[in-house]
Image: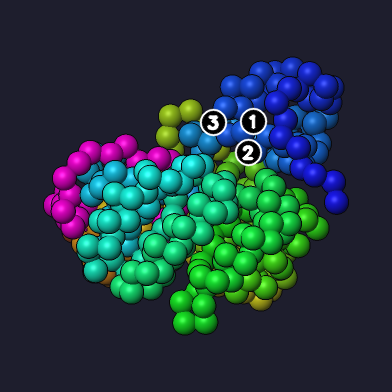
Amino acid sequence: MAEVKRITNFDNYTMIPEPDKEQLRKIQDKFSYRLNDYYVNLIQWEDPKDPIRKLLVTPSEILSEYGMMDAKGYSLEQAPGCMVIYRTTALLSITEDCGAETLPGLKYIAANTEINSVIITGADSFRPATERLHQLLSRLRDMKHVHVIRLRTKMTSFNPKRISEDMELLYTLHDFSTPEQRIYISNHVNHPRELTTDAIRAFRALHDAGVILNNQTPILKGVNDDPVVLAELLDKLSGAGVTPYDFFVNRQVKGNHEFVLPLEEVYQIVEEAKYRTVGSGKGVRLSINHRSGKMEIMAINQGKAYLKYYRSRNDQEGILILDCPPGATELDELQNDELARRKLQRNAATEPLASENSDSETSSEIGVL
């Protein structure tokens, strides 16, 4: 099979417009794993509105692609590279080297036995060398209180052969994903055109390795804000054995205004997509993230939004009913009901989680399940 080649020089790619080349050069250092001939060739460059093009040339820091918990103003880091986001869930940040920088976080998790779920985040989980990933998984599996390990990856979209053709990686996953304690892999496929033959082959290889696969997708204006497109995505994911875990509202941050949609419109798009799909796609949730936790948007009807916590900082439960004015794009714009407002503030209180003692700037690429 042809090897996927990383692009370091765009001069020979005459089909790429010059303005796009300039943008790609800007993101080349930070997001080099995206820039390969496989993904570039998925794009119809003659179409200025091509959704894959828009995903590639937009810097990820202005796309909150993974529905992070809004941690602005909160101290979440308990050890370098380790954040406890909920009482029993920790994020462990890795880099491409995935070496000594994870040791403080691993020590913290080992010492705090109430943590039973670890999400490996930071760099793409499949960017570090397989040997490094093996060492990390081995350390976590030695901690008997850690029952769930979750990896997150874009490689099934950007470079699926990194998975399907690396037998050492697949053997590693097979060794540590046991019938009693499976490894979960959260994929981030945003458009059905990313589900190529190579991507399906990568999913099949992961299935054979014994991991559990799901998918999280942000609703992005100009990319996938079409119920027909989303229904096709749901059908293809289900057909490939990947559970559509959730769609989520793209958080508004500086520079991403063109991708943001009103909450009511997002809800209507998702509901129509679910109506059109079959199989496991009908169970997909629409999620919204807030500094108080993660919620499901159950319905938006007659100016009211009905939401339910399924993860919160203070283990709060229950349903919130909030006014939803036309054009509202985020949760804080819905806090018009006094009782609901107080509940949100209570859940977002800044009491430390575990032994919170340091400041951390949370990446917009953190994926919180």
Residue bearing the label numbered 3: 30
Residue 247 visible in the picture? no
> Disc 1 marks which residue?
57
Measured from the top left, where is residue 355 in percent x and y? 16, 53
Placement of 114 over or under 43, stated as above or below: below
Q: Quadrant of residue 236?
A: bottom right
Q: Are marks 2 and 3 in contact (CB under 8 Å)?
A: no
Q: Is residue 186 left or right of residue 275?
A: left
Q: Secondary structure at mark 3?
A: loop
Give the dominant element type of the magenta stretch: helix, strand or loop: loop
Q: Image quadrant of residue 211?
A: bottom right
Callout 3 crowding tier (Cα within 10 Å): few <14, some 14–19, many ≥20: few
Report the residue at 67% width, 46% height from top: 158
Percent x, y of residue 159: 69, 47
Q: Earlier in the sequence, mark 2 or mark 1?
A: 2
Element under label 2? Answer: helix
Q: Amino acid at mark 2?
A: Tyr
Query: From the viewer's perspective, is the residue at label 1 or at label 3 nearer?
Result: 3
Distance from disc 1 to disc 3, alpha carbons, whole Å, reads 13 Å
Q: Residue at x 51, y 55 (%)?
A: 133
Camera-nearest label, 2 or 1: 2
Amino acid type of disc 1? Answer: Val
Residue behind mark 2: 33
Of the numbered discs 1 and 3, the one sitting upstream in the chain is 3
Q: Are marks 2 and 1 in contact (CB under 8 Å)?
A: no
Local packing at callout 2 (Cα closer than 10 Å; few below 14, some 14-19, many 20+) is: some
Inspect the image, locate mark 3, and give the three-letter code of the amino acid beneath it: Lys
Residue stretch rendered in magenta on the structure: 342-369
Residue at the (51%, 59%) spot, across then down: 134
